[in-house]
Image: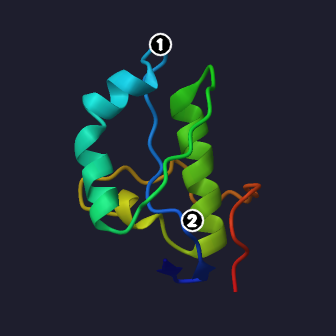
Amino acid sequence: MDYRAGRSAMVLYACSDAGETLRVFVAGRGARDLDRAISAGARWIRFAATPNPRPELDRLLEGFVERFGSPPISNSGPARREPAAAGRRGAIKGEEEPR
């Protein structure tokens, strides 16, 4: 995907609630967001367990906005939450480098 400050394969960042399994998230409240992400070109889902899903989601979104100039395409719709402090600097390992 082309973003303001580079290219990334990332289309959506999302998180389950603490104690919610990935299976429950994908089959339930995450299904609509995942369908939108697939329509935008997503082909893979990457996940990682964390004890604090919401703060980790905010951290990932903040880092993405800092590096690429806007949130991932499926996080940027009108009902999407912007990261809490988009101006904070940070790096995300495994993401493509900005151009």
Q: Secondary structure at mark 2?
A: helix
Which residue carries the number 1 mark? 19
Q: Residue furthest bottom?
A: 99
Quadrant of residue 5 within the rendered picture: bottom right
Q: Give percent across and percent down for residue 39.
A: 27, 64
Say few, some or many: other residues with alpha carbon within 10 Å of mark 2 (under 14 / 14 to 19 / 20 or more): many
x 57%, y 58%: residue:
86
Q: Position of residue 81 (x, y in %)?
A: 37, 49
Residue 17, percent across and down? 43, 23
| Cα separation between marks 1 and 2 | 27 Å
Q: Which mark is residue 57?
A: none
Q: Residue at x 38, y 57 (%)?
A: 75
Number of residues whose C-alpha sits closer than 10 Å to that of mark 1, classed few (under 14), some (14–19) or many (20 or more): few
Compared with residue 70, is residue 86 higher up or lower down, i.e. above or below? above
- Residue under label 2, please give it: 65
Mark closest to the chain's N terminus, 1 or 2: 1
Residue 8 in the image: x percent, y percent?
A: 58, 72
Look at the image and tell me in which quarter the C terminus lies: bottom right
Vertical order, 48 against 93 (above or below): above
Q: Residue furthest top?
A: 19
Total marks drawn?
2
Q: Amino acid at mark 2?
A: Val
Q: CB under 8 Å between callouts 1 and 2?
A: no
Of 49 and 85, the residue lying toward us: 49
Three-letter residue code for mark 1: Gly
Q: Is residue 22 above or below residue 2?
A: above
State the residue at coordinates (73%, 60%). Answer: 89
Image height check: is 92 above or below 46? below
Please indicate whether residue 25 sits to the left or right of residue 32 in the image. Answer: right
Q: Nearer the viewer, mark 1 or mark 2?
A: 1
SS of the residue under disc 1: loop
Q: Is residue 17 left or right of residue 62?
A: left
